[in-house]
Image (cartoon, rainbow, N blue to C red):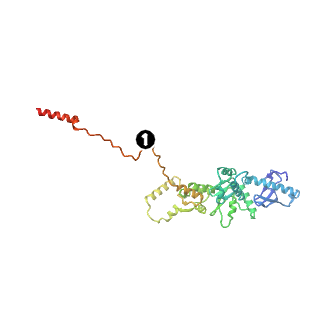
């Protein structure tokens, strides 16, 4: 057993460790140990069981070997999380964020880290990315931990450390979201395994982050419109999407479907409504279906909201046109306009007057 391959040991979801004597056998084998709560959530203790398999072994050596195997197993399945234990010469803000993400098994509400995030510069953010930490609009998490094996192991470790009965009720492998009873579940557990709860749904963090990013990216003047792709990402109905968005703190301000229901029944259809009906009939005939317009929400007030609002309300400042360079002629702007004048000629000196005099003299002689 002390020379066995790591693959001959397996960890069950109930905290049991199994040993398979035949390396090529895919079955888990015999139970040889149980996990017990340790000082650190990622470092549980190994308790050997008394049975025929362990009886022939040196108990101290076997326990130490299995303990070392468990450490390697956790290190492989939760590699990005374990890597946060080494932050080198990173700045204090980066180390603080890494520590809290590590302690929370890979996911922390952004508002809980707000003071540390404000201290980050471009290099600090690069250091966090090197540790595979994503600073999402609402949640800070490690996307690489969304794999089913990582979800199950975190569920086991969280339950053990928090004195819960094993096995924990983890979601099925690969499921995007599922309905839960908010009053009957532990929200912290679902958050720890990367399935935060909003309204009546536990949602896998990567898809939830996609919806959140789409909300803030599409927001204008503090409002955004729900999109059909959001419901598709969450794997839920439109009403389910609305519930999730409202649970995030966004407020529905206009719902075209609800407005249509309020319309007076039996009222004559307008020409516009008749045109829409014809268009819908055409789409149905062509095997197409137009997706209805979804509700508009007011964005939850917070850092992202304030940033969007400040950008929208930024006043337009008209820049003054640069003054044209003035030449020497316009140097004195206060001078009075110069008036050009010339003395009038005497009538006698005018050639027309002389000609007139000659005509008069000729007439007198005749």
Closer to the camera, 62 or 125?
125
Q: Position of residue 178 (x, y in %)?
A: 65, 60
Helix, strand or loop under label 1: helix
Pick out the residue farthest to the left.
366
Residue 212 visible: yes
Q: What is the crowding at mark 1: few (fewer than 14 residues within 10 Å), some, or many (at least 20)?
A: few
Q: Position of residue 167 (x, y in %)?
A: 74, 62
Q: Position of residue 189 (x, y in %)?
A: 70, 62
Corner quadrant of residue 330:
top left
Disc 1 target residue: 328
Q: Is residue 360 left or right of residue 2?
A: left
Residue drawn at the location 66% of the way across and 49% of the way down: 123
Q: Position of residue 122 (x, y in %)?
A: 64, 50
Q: Is residue 137 left or right of residue 39?
A: left
Closer to the camera, 120 or 366?
366
Q: Is residue 90 left or right of residue 251?
A: right
- Number of marks in the rendered image: 1
Q: Is residue 69 left or right of residue 272?
A: right
Corner quadrant of residue 246:
bottom right
Residue 27 visible: no
Where's the C terminus, which quadrant? top left
Residue drawn at the location 76% of the way across and 53% of the way down: 75
């Amino acid at each position: 057993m002390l020379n066995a391959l790591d693959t001959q040991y397996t960890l069950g979801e109930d905290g049991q460790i199994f040993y398979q004597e035949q390396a090529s056998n895919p079955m888990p084998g015999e139970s040889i140990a149980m996990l017990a709560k340790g000082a650190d959530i990622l470092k549980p203790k190994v308790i050997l069981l008394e049975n025929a398999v362990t009886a022939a072994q040196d108990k101290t050596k076997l326990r130490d070997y299995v303990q070392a195997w468990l450490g390697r197993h956790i290190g492989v399945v939760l590699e990005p999380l374990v890597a946060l234990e080494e932050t080198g010469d990173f700045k204090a803000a980066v180390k603080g964020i890494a520590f809290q993400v590590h302690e929370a098994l890979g996911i922390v509400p952004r508002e809980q880290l707000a003071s540390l995030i404000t201290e980050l510069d471009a290099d600090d953010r690069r250091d966090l990315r090197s540790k595979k930490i994503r600073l999402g609009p609402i949640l800070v998490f490690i996307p690489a931990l969304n794999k089913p094996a990582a979800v199950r192991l975190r569920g086991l470790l969280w339950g053990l450390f928090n004195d819960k009965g094993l096995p924990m009720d983890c979601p099925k492998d690969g499921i995007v979201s599922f309905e839960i009873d908010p009053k009957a579940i532990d929200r912290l557990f679902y958050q720890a395994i990367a399935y935060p709860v909003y309204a009546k749904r536990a949602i896998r963090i990567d898809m939830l982050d996609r919806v959140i990013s789409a909300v803030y990216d599409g927001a204008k003047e503090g409002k955004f419109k729900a999109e059909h792709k959001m419901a598709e990402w969450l794997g839920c109905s439109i009403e389910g999407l609305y519930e999730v968005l409202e649970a995030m703190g966004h407020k529905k301000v206009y719902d075209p479907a609800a407005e249509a229901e309020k319309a007076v029944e039996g009222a004559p259809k307008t020409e516009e409504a008749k045109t829409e009906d014809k268009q819908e009939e055409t789409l149905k005939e062509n095997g197409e279906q137009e997706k209805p317009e979804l509700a508009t929400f007011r964005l939850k007030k917070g850092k992202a909201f304030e940033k969007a609002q400040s950008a929208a309300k930024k006043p337009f400042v008209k820049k003054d046109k640069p003054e044209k360079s003035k030449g020497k002629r316009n140097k004195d702007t206060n001078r009075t306009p110069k008036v050009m004048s010339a003395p009038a000629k005497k009538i006698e000196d005018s050639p027309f007057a002389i000609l007139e005099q000659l005509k008069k003299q000729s007439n007198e002689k005749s």
